[in-house]
Image (cartoon, rainbow, N blue to C red):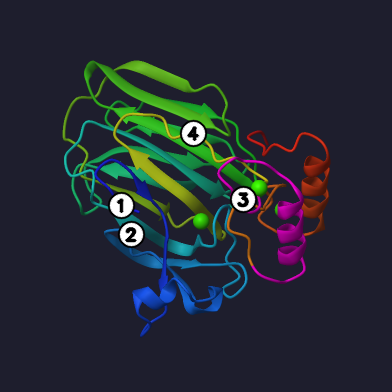
């Protein structure tokens, strides 16, 4: 969904030829993952689901796969001094990956900041004009929640980074005033090695985004893990219908018996979804 203040990464629309009205009554097979919410995309980037496209997702039915140089671009910033953004990133790269960046134009120029993830999963947010950066450890071969806050100012510029919910690492005294932010790109921005996956991107102009509650397989609003979630994880792990919540309890990019075990355990104990690794 798009509005003036936030943006989600992936849409799911009716397959070509189907009317939107009909989509509400259609099964999963009639729906297709799309990148239509973005202003544009380039290169080897695709939206898809685990069942029909073999594309891992963290939440909902769709994820985004990047298999070479490629990105999606959002021009909604359109001249702002601050952006808060969170994405889930599956870190499978064997070299340093540049996965997100903001620009002072809509052509990939006048870079204002970028986010990189090294082969060990360590995440770095760099303010381009000052060269200042902050880093936090992430996890390789796993989904990571990466949230950044970037703002420009004369002695009050900000870079703030939180990986997997850790207390943010930040610098709030940057002198990085300059060209306003016009666009952002998410993807493989430096032609790094390996296939990477993104999901659940959201950007705002000020307030923190936070993490999704994990292991809530059916995505119910109360975040409870119970027998309904067990039924759905058993179904998906067995090759059946995809669950619409956050079923990858182990956060390894696969839905299998490990997730079933964890979700059965949660359903029998706390009954609460998880926001820790
Ligand atoms: Ca998704
Ligand atoms: Ca639930
Ligand atoms: Ca898993």
Look at the numbered discs 3 and 1 and tell me whether their residues touch, using CB distance below 8 Å: no
Expressed as whole percent of the image width and height from the top left, the position of residue 143 reads 61, 47
Kindly check if marks 4 and 2 are in contact, taking CB atoms under 8 A apart as contact.
no
- Residue 238 image position (x, y, % from top left): 77, 68
| Residue 233 colored in magenta in the image | yes
Residue 96 visible in the picture: no
> Which residue is label 4 attached to?
210
The answer to whether 125 is drawn above or below residue 95 in the figure is above
Residue 187 occupies quadrant: bottom left
Disc 3 from disc 1: Cα separation: 21 Å
Q: Of the residues tagged 2 and 3, which is closer to the observer?
A: 3
Q: Secondary structure at mark 4?
A: loop
Q: Residues within 10 Å of mark 3 (few under 14, many from 20)?
A: many
Q: Earlier in the sequence, mark 3 or mark 4?
A: 4
Q: Per the image, is 183 magenta?
A: no
In the rendered image, the quadrant that contains the N terminus is bottom left
Residue for badge 1: 2
Residue annotated with mark 2: 37
Say whether marks 2 and 3 touch (CB < 8 Å).
no
Mark with earlier residue (4, 1)? 1
Depth check, front residue: 250 or 194: 250
């Amino acid at each position: 969904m798009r509005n003036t203040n936030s943006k989600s990464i992936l849409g799911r629309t009716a397959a070509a030829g189907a009317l939107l009205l009909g989509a509400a009554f259609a099964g999963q097979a009639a729906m297709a993952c799309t990148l239509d919410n973005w202003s544009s995309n380039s290169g080897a980037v695709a939206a898809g689901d685990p069942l029909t496209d073999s594309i891992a997702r963290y939440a909902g039915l769709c994820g985004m796969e990047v298999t070479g140089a490629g990105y999606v671009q959002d021009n909604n910033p359109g001249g702002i001094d601050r952006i808060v953004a969170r994405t889930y990133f599956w870190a499978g790269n064997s070299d340093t990956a540049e996965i997100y960046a903001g620009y002072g134009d809509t052509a990939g120029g006048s870079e204002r900041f970028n986010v990189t993830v090294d082969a060990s999963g360590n995440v770095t947010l760099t303010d381009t004009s000052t060269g200042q950066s902050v880093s936090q450890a992430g996890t390789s071969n796993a989904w990571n929640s990466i949230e950044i806050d970037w703002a420009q100012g004369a002695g009050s510029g900000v870079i703030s980074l939180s990986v997997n919910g850790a207390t943010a690492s930040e610098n709030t005294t940057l002198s990085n005033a300059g060209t306003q932010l016009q666009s952002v790109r998410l993807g493989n921005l430096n032609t790094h090695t390996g296939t990477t996956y993104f999901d659940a991107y959201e950007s705002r102009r000020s307030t923190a985004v936070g993490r999704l509650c994990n292991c809530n397989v059916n995505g119910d609003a109360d975040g409870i893990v119970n027998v309904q979630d067990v039924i759905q994880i058993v179904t998906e792990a067995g090759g059946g219908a995809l669950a619409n919540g956050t079923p990858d309890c182990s956060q390894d990019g696969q839905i299998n018996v490990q997730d079933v075990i964890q979700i059965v355990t949660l359903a029998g104990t706390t009954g609460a979804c998880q926001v820790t690794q």
